[in-house]
Image (spheres, grey):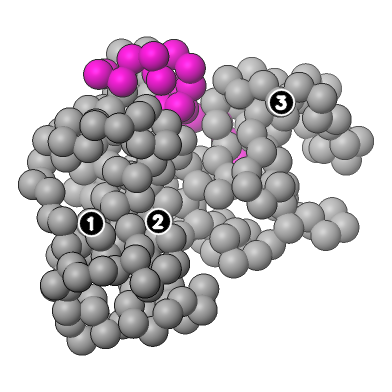
Amino acid sequence: MSSPLAGQTRLDGVAVPDWVRELAGDGPVRPVWRNEDGGLTFRFGDGIRFLKAQRPGLDWQPDAERVRLDWVGGFVPAPRVLRHGVHGELHWVLTTGLPGRSAVDPAWLARPEIAIPALGRGLRRFHDAVPVVDCPFSWSVRERVDRFGLDPVFLARVPPLDVVVCHGDACNPNFLLDDDGRVTGYVDLGGLGVADRWADLAPALMSLGWNYGPGWEPTFLAAYGVPDDPAKRVYYSALWDGVGDNLGRTGAVGTG
C-alpha cells in the first residue's frame, strides 16, 4: 500500500511525467515512494504537497481515502486533500505534507530503540483520539471478507471485539516521526474504520519484523499499553494475509 512520505526515499531512474510537473507548478518534483501495486508518490517542492497516482483497485480506492482524510483530520494529524483527478488509467490525489520522516527512514531503522516505542505510543494515541461513536466507516471482518473475497471461515471465528477506530494500515511506513522520535502524523488512511484494535496491532507487529528485525514486539506492546493476545494476534495476522488456513488452533470463536 502506498504512503505519501516526507520525501526521504529516493527513487533513482523514475521519470516524472509531464502532467505531474504541470500540477507541481514552478517548483521541483521528486518521486519518493513506489508501492507494491506500482502506485507512485511525488514530492512537490520542499514537501509542502504530495501527489499520489495509482490505478484504483481493492487496496486503493481514491474516493474512500479522500472522504476518510477529510473526516479524520479533525482528530489527528493527517494529510489534507487539496485536489484530485484522473489522468488516463491513473487516479491522483494531491494532499498537504506533514512534518517528520517516515518511521522506516534509514535514520529510524538505525535507532529502533527510539522509533519502536514511539510507534506504539503513536498508534495508541490514534485509537484514543478518534471517536468510535461518530465514525461513519467500517474496517470490520465482514467488510474485509466481502471486499477482498476472503475465506468465510474468518466470519465464523471472530474473537470477542474491543472496538476502536482503526488506521486500516498501521504498518510502520505510515507513521511519521519528528527528530525527537514523536509521531507527527498518519498517512495511507484509505482503510480507516471501526474494528477491533488488533486489526491494527497485528499488522503493526508484523511490520516490525519486516522493517526492524525480530524481537521488538514486546517493546511495541508495552509502549502501546496492552498485553499480548496470541489468539487475536494470530487471527488478525491471518486476516491481513487473507489466508484462512493460517488461523490454526487459536481458540478464537465468535458469531462474526
Q: Position of residue 144 (x, y in %)?
A: 43, 73
Q: What is the crowding at mark 1: few (fewer than 14 residues within 10 Å), some, or many (at least 20)?
A: many
Residue at 69% of width from left, 47% of height from top? 39
Callout 3: SS = loop
Which quadrant of the figure has residue 216? top left
* Residue 171 in the image: above or below residue 151: above
Q: Which residues are magenta?
A: 95-114
Badge 1 amino acid: Arg
Residue picked out by circle 2: 168
Q: CA distance from mark 3 to mark 2?
A: 26 Å
Callout 1: SS = helix
Q: Nearer the viewer, mark 3 or mark 1?
A: 1
Q: Nearer the viewer, mark 2 or mark 1?
A: 1
Mark 3 or mark 2, earlier in chain: 3
Residue picked out by circle 1: 233
Badge 3 amino acid: Leu
Q: Nearer the viewer, mark 3 or mark 2?
A: 3
